[in-house]
Image: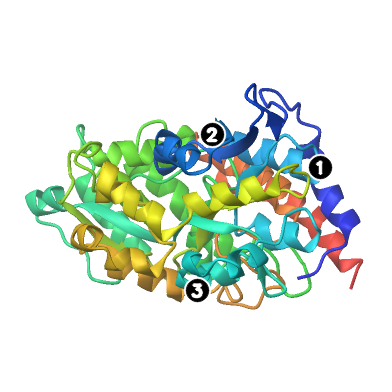
Amino acid sequence: MKFSRPRMFGALVATVTLVMTGCSGAGSLTGGGGREITVAMVSNSQMQDAVALSDQFEEQNPGVSVKFVTLSENEARAKITASVATGGGEFDVVMISNYETPMWGEYGWLVNLSPYMDADPEYDADDFIPTLKTALSHDGSMYSAPFYGESSFLMYNKKLFEQAGVTLRANPTWPEVAEVAKKLDNERTAGICLRGKPGWGEVLAPLNTVINAFGGRWYDEDWNAQLDSPEVEAAVQFYVDTVRNHGEAGASSSGFQECGNLLSQGQVAMWYDATSAVSVLESPETSSIAGDVGYLPAPSMAKQDNGWLYTWSLGIPTSSKHPDEAWSFIRWMTSKSYIEYVSEKLGPSHVPPGSRLSTYELPAYKELAKPFAEQTLTSMQAANQLKPTLQPVPYTGVQFLAIPEFQDLGTRVSQQISAAIAGQISVKDALAQSQEYAEVVGKSYQREQ
């Protein structure tokens, strides 16, 4: 889809008005006359590994030092969006995703990285998983480079399944998953973990794939909002009931990190979420069930192939004063050699997954990845951002809508869903309010038709 610059700016008003605290000016001179670049990243485990290993980058790039600003997912989205949209210049490198990249590339907010990649044959951009490469491109050029990529699947504790004598078939439906969650739910262990934390990139990520599976959609082809449709209501009611009845305690405040901790410590039996979670689950350092995790594709209903497609990637805002140094950092953190370095230095379980095809040929990682590699790559390659739903829609994106308004719209809707999970309102009331939010956005597109 194409969007006018006024539409993009209008959609970001709520974000841009955030106070930009805790961010120093980017591209400053260090005391020794070198260059300092500021890198804004999400504080997930693989990103923390990069911070810990960044001395290697500084050794390889004399005169360039790195200042990291690591933030929680919701905070990172808000601060990075506000800075890039206004040309604030706080950051030289920003961690974004396949939601932001094509739009921001179209509006000239990001540096085109393809010339850098093309000038460096050793970097091998063709090694990126094709669906990710496409998802991070605008008009044939890449505007960010994937650090790790992911789809979604169902992860489960094999020992708990064996002890309870329960199984799931190779391609389970959501009701089948809920039935097993009920059987495994007890005083010691919750049956399943599902995100309930507010945020368009938190609870709505898994929930949108459930809506897709049930045959639901946010809008019909004419931009009429559909959040109060029978299909969407059935999906959301199912999700809320499942996590309330058989899910983790405090589900309305649980996100990716919280669910990962619970499954890795044997406190929940199943978890539906990102394939990148294998880095936590298969590491003996962080997981008590490493080697005992099973993996199944995203559950189905009316629609098959419901895994999402997502990547945390690195881009350079056009407001950066030192784009060449910024590219040097991106090259370091998204290269084949970085992946090999992580494997050697920290172990194969720390390798950022799902970005490069060659990752799955590294001997150490290949051995570790046997239980999940095929499922990960199959899910990523099957995810279709252009046709995410059973019925036709005017938008693209699997677990998000690739429209600029979705940051605000999705956040508002997620707050309603989270309130329903917390038992503060009914699903019907949550969707009635969400429908009103969606109608406002839909009408703005209808006026343009």
Callout 3 amino acid: Asp
Tags 1 and 2 touching, CB below 8 Å: no
Examine the rendered structure and indicate whether residue 42 appears above or below residue 21.
below
Which callout, 3 or 2, points to the residue nearer the camera?
Answer: 3
Q: Which residue is tagged 2?
A: 72
Measure how far apart labels 3 and 2 are at the Cα level: 31 Å
Percent x, y for residue 245?
35, 42
What residue lies at 44% left-to-right and 62% top-to-bottom? 355
Q: Which mark is residue 87?
A: 1
Quadrant of the snapshot with the N terminus: bottom right
Quadrant of the snapshot with the C terminus: bottom right
What residue lies at 42% left-to-right and 47% top-to-bottom? 241
Which image quarter: residue 120? Answer: bottom right
Is residue 264 shown left or right of residue 416? left
The disc, 1 or 2, on the residue closer to the chain's N-terminal end is 2
Q: Secondary structure at mark 2?
A: loop
The disc, 1 or 3, on the residue closer to the chain's N-terminal end is 1
What residue lies at 62% left-to-right and 24% top-to-bottom? 32
Q: Which residue is tagged 3?
A: 126
Measure how far apart labels 1 and 2 are at the Cα level: 22 Å
Which image quarter: residue 297? Answer: bottom left
Callout 2 amino acid: Ser
Which callout, 1 or 2, points to the residue nearer the camera?
Answer: 1
Examine the rendered structure and indicate whether residue 368 appears above or below residue 95.
below
Callout 1 amino acid: Gly
According to the image, what is the colour scheme of the structure?
rainbow
- Pick the front one: 319 or 222: 319
Which callout, 1 or 3, points to the residue nearer the camera?
Answer: 3
Which image quarter: residue 340? Answer: bottom left
Evaluate whether residue 369 shows in this view: yes
Q: Secondary structure at mark 1?
A: loop
